[in-house]
Each structure stands twice: as structure tokens, then as C-alpha cells.
Image: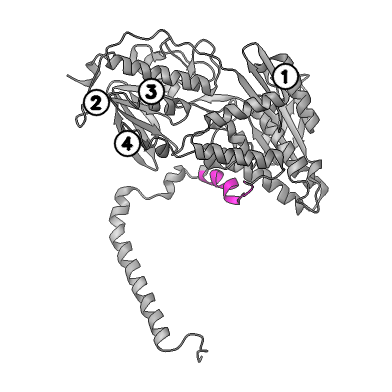
Amino acid sequence: MSVENLDPTLPTPSDPSTGRHRVVVVGSGFGGLFATKQMRRSDVEITMVAKTTHHLFQPLLYQVATGILSEGEIAPPTREVLATQQNARVILGEVTDIDLGSRTVTSHVLGRRTITPYDSLIVAAGAGQSYFGNNHFAEFAPGMKSIDDALELRGRIFGAFELAEIAESEEEIDRLLTFVVVGAGPTGVEMAGQIAELAHRTLKRDFRRINTREARVILVDAAPQVLPPFGEKLGRTSQKALEDLGVEVQLGAMVVDVDERGLEVQDKDGTRRRIDAVTKVWAAGVQASSLGAQLAERTGAPLDRAGRIGVNPDLTLPGHPEIFVVGDMISLNNLPGVAQVAIQGAKYAAKEIDGRLKGKAPQKPFEYFDKGSMATISRFKAVAMVGKIRLTGFVAWLMWLAVHLVYITGFKNRLTALLHWFVSFIGRGRSERTATEQQIFARAALGRLEGGASDLVSPPGEWNEQRETLEAERRAQLEARATEEARLTDSGARGVKQEA
């Protein structure tokens, strides 16, 4: 009997080596990780396929970009996190194709292709930054969705101050010390607040020529208020707190063009104006993984404008109960694109797979339990929304601190994060200020290669053909160098002037 004819609601022990049901999990974010961990005691073989080697705690990316935390504290290696889970393995690769007929997942990394069969599939590929059809903006205004984004922005932000210190004109200094954050949602608000604190508090004693407190931090959004999902009252409170920090909040302003030295915005009355700024941060809009569009085309599921795929109430796809989609990729009951939706959906899908294997009745339709939302504005200031309760200021900030400590993966990372927060918030230091040109320019350079990073790596077959020749040449060079070193020592020629 072929795999595609098996009833997906029944146990299908297809792995010839273990006889276990095969579950493939796409993605190592909150959805992928929590789905995998939920099945740690299930009689399944799990393969996680992810395009990065780490699990990213995305809500704290802005703190990596502004020098508070290191990337390792919010992105522990996925293999380390799952090291003790014997029924799970991790393979590196970006999923490019899902064959619903043969039930296989195809992934690629650096020109290498891997095909992984599944009996049940959980797709938790998440979402990326959306530039609303203007993807060329990304070169000049990085988003906030990956470690690469955060490290590039760290280089741009701290590099702007360094270049301003050696700038030759006031106009150049002004352009370098103007920072624009596009998008007044939680990420944009947190990013703008931290850049303002960095300029006005952390760096104020570090430079001799420039006055970092004169830096401009501008928060731009086409929306009529800050933090729309938090309601009008908390939005007004947040805007006032940002303005007290020195952030210029420009609402009703839509970005229409971005280049290396600035951006152009259009106000509600149609007026266009330019803001000169070298450093731009894009925190506006998200686009679901392209796998959503692929699955929609093959299953007939609807797709919304943000690329999110419509799923059944049990998070499966129409006509394919063996495929679950969770997290930012789904369109169901107007669920928000937050970590808790991914976590709860992942646990639901994992329990359903386990229940099917044990012959249990299906669960009730998925229901999301809203645990609240929060965003920091600056040290000791935050806003929080839990049910009907609205909190601001220090109490909300303490809540934010506690919640984020809980969800950081690993005791060591929690401890070091707490230490860095103490240094940054009680004092004024930031321990992660290292920035290099490579961080700023490497991604753009790779993007100019036709095949990306794959162009820099020899195909496996080609390398095998060349290896013996390369090893022979290297051996000859090493032997010649060793012979010459011995001759110089034995002849007493070191440090002796040689005759012409």
C-alpha cells in the first residue's frame, strides 16, 4: 500500500528502521520548537527542518541591535535545546517544496538538497518583513526579523556615531545622527525608545567632537496612533512617553521611497517631504512565509493579502488532515501574529497527532487564550494589556521583565540576560557594542551574487574531484617549508645579514 493511500487520521508507522510514525516540523521558531517538545513522549520520529541552526526569541531582537544583549542569549542552538529529546533530530535547510502526493519535504542549503518523508507535517515557517511591494527598500532599511537583521542594524547604529565623530561638515553629522524607525507597532516603539536612550544616555560621555544628545530619533507611521493593537488610551500614553524621551513621532506619514541617504514620506494631505538619515529601521508590516502560498495553491485553501493561509478550525488544511499549519502563517478568527498563538497552536497540533496514534477522539476546535500584550518604551516604562486591565509605567515594565525571562530558553541565558539588563537599565553601560563592516555590508554583497552564498561553495562532487590534487599540493608546500625552517636553524642563518 502506498503512503498516499493511508488514512492520515490513523497510525501510520512508516519508518522502516523504527516502525514509528514520522512527523516533520518545518521551522525552529516558537511554533516548531514547542510542537517538537510537546511530542517528546510520543511514539513518533520527529525531524525538524529549519533554515537556521538556532531558535530565535524574536521579541528581543531590538535589544541585540542596540547593544543590550548578545545574539546567543536570545538564539540558543536548536540542537542544544533538543539534545536530550531522543525522538527528535534537526536538519539544516530552507524548505522549498512540499509534495502532498508523495508526502515529502524538500529543503536546500548551499546547493545541497535533502528530501524528508513524513506521515504528519507541522508547518511553522513564520513570517518575514513586508515592504509592501518595495523590496528594494530592504537594502537601505533592514527589518527586525532575524539575527542577521539585528547585527546589521547594530553595525549601522553604532557605526553612525563613529562616522559622525570624523565627519567633515555639519550637514553630514546631522544626516548621520538622524535615526528613522518606520512602523509604530511594538517593535518600532521599542526600537525608537532604545535608540533614544542609547544616544541621550549611554553614549553621552563617549565622544569628544559630537554631542550624541543632539541625535534625532524619528518614529514614522501612516497609522493615526502609536501601538494601534493596544487601543487609543495606551497609544496616547506611549506616544507621550516616547516624546518625553526625545523621540519625534510623525503619524499619518507614509514612506514612499528609501535610498542610502534618507527617505521620502507623504503626509495625509498629499505633501511629500524628505528626511535625510543614514540609518533607517523598517518595523512596519509582515509577510507570511512563501510556503503558505504554495500550500494554498495545492490545497485550494484561501490566502489573505499578508500571505497567511486559511486553515480548518483544527489547524489542518482542507482535504489534508495530516498537515497542520501554526503561528504567523495562519488566517483564522483574526488571530494576532504573536508568539502565544504559535505556542498554543503548536501544542494543539502535537496533541492531535499523539491522540490519533493512541486512537483518541479528535480535540475540540482550536481556541486561543489571550494572555495579554506588552511593549517597553524605555527603562522602567512599558505598557501592558491583560484582558480588561491596562497598566503603564514601572509596574508594566516589571511584568514585561518577568514574562520575557520566563520565555528565554535556558537557565544560563536567563541569568546572563538579567545581568545585562541590570547593567543597562540600572547603569548606563551596554556590553554588546562590537560592530564590524562585515556585519553591515556582507548581506548586501551576498545578495549581489546570482546564487547567493551557494556561489562561494564548491558542489560536493566537484570538491571530491579536486581534493586529492589540493592535498598533494599542500603536502609539498608544508614539507618544503619545514625543510627550509630546519636548514635556517641548523646553519645558524637566523638573524644574520645575508650577503647580496
Distance Cα–Cα, label 1 vs label 3: 36 Å
The answer to which of 254 and 362 lies nearer the viewer is: 362
Q: Amino acid at mark 4?
A: Thr
The answer to which of 35 and 225 lies nearer the viewer is: 35
Q: Position of residue 103 (x, y in %)?
A: 29, 23
**Residue on which the image places disc 4:** 114
Q: Amino acid at mark 3?
A: Ile
**Residue on which the image places disc 1:** 235
Residue at 34% in and 48% down: 459
Q: Quadrant of residue 222?
A: top right
Magenta stretch prevailing secondary structure = helix
- Return the mark for residue 122: 3
- Return the mark for residue 20: 2
Quadrant where the N terminus sits is top left
Q: Secondary structure at mark 1?
A: helix
Residue 184 visible in the current orientation: no
Q: Please report contact status of discs 1 and 3: CB closer than 8 Å, yes or no.
A: no
Residue at 53% in and 14% down: 335
Label 4 crowding class (10 Å Cα cut-off): few <14, some 14-19, many 20+?
A: some
Q: Secondary structure at mark 4?
A: strand
The answer to which of 366 and 291 lies nearer the viewer is: 366
Label 3 crowding class (10 Å Cα cut-off): few <14, some 14-19, many 20+?
A: many
Q: Is residue 256 above or below residue 277?
A: above
